[in-house]
Image (cartoon, helix red, strand yellow):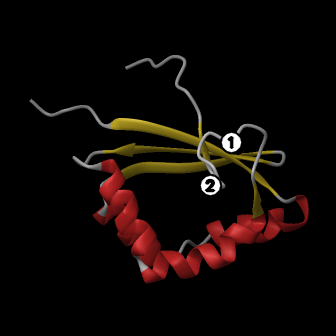
Amino acid sequence: MTRAPERHALVVGVRPEKREEYLKLHSAVWPGVEQKLVECNIRNYSIFVFGDILFAYYEYVGEDHDADMQRIADDPVSQEWWKHTDPCQVRIAEERIPGALWQPVDEVWHLG
């Protein structure tokens, strides 16, 4: 039996003066960034924008989420991508993971 994917959701603020730059970057995400996400068992990744809030959702289909997230963090192409995207982002109110821009949010309900 196949195990159901883990669902992950995160939020971050987008700097109003960098909003258009962020949206432009994501209109053509670098192929190497997308490839690494797929290699690291990320599926159905979406980022939504609502005013100055970004909401991300993805499904994880691997066996070791932390190890795969580290593989992404260690990837030179992803690191270069973040040099462009991170300045567009700002932490929002609650900081569950100290120092992280993107903060996890709790799932309240799921229709499966």
Q: What is the crowding at mark 1: few (fewer than 14 residues within 10 Å), some, or many (at least 20)?
A: few
Residue 103 image offset from top left, x and y in percent:
62, 44
Left or right: 18, with 84 as reference point: right
Residue at x 32% of width, y 59% of height: 68
Can you tell which quarter of the image residue 96 is in? top right
> Judging from the image, what secondary structure is the residue with disc 1 in?
loop
Asked whether 73 or 44 is in front, the reply is: 73
Q: What is the crowding at mark 2: few (fewer than 14 residues within 10 Å), some, or many (at least 20)?
A: few
Answer with mark 2 or mark 1, whichever residue precedes in sequence.
Answer: 1
Left or right: 4, with 76 as reference point: left
Q: Quadrant of the C terminus?
A: top left
Classify 29 as above or below 59: below
Residue at x 41% of width, y 74% of height: 74
Asked whether 21 or 12 is in front, the reply is: 12
Three-letter amino acid code at disc 1? Glu
Report which residue position mark 2 lands on: 100
Residue 95 got which mark?
1
Q: Quadrant of the N terminus?
A: top left
Residue 7 image offset from top left, x and y in percent:
41, 36
Residue at x 84% of width, y 45% of height: 51
The alpha-carbon separation of the residues under discs 2 and 1 comes to 8 Å
Residue 91 image offset from top left, x and y in percent:
75, 51
Q: Residue furthest right?
A: 17
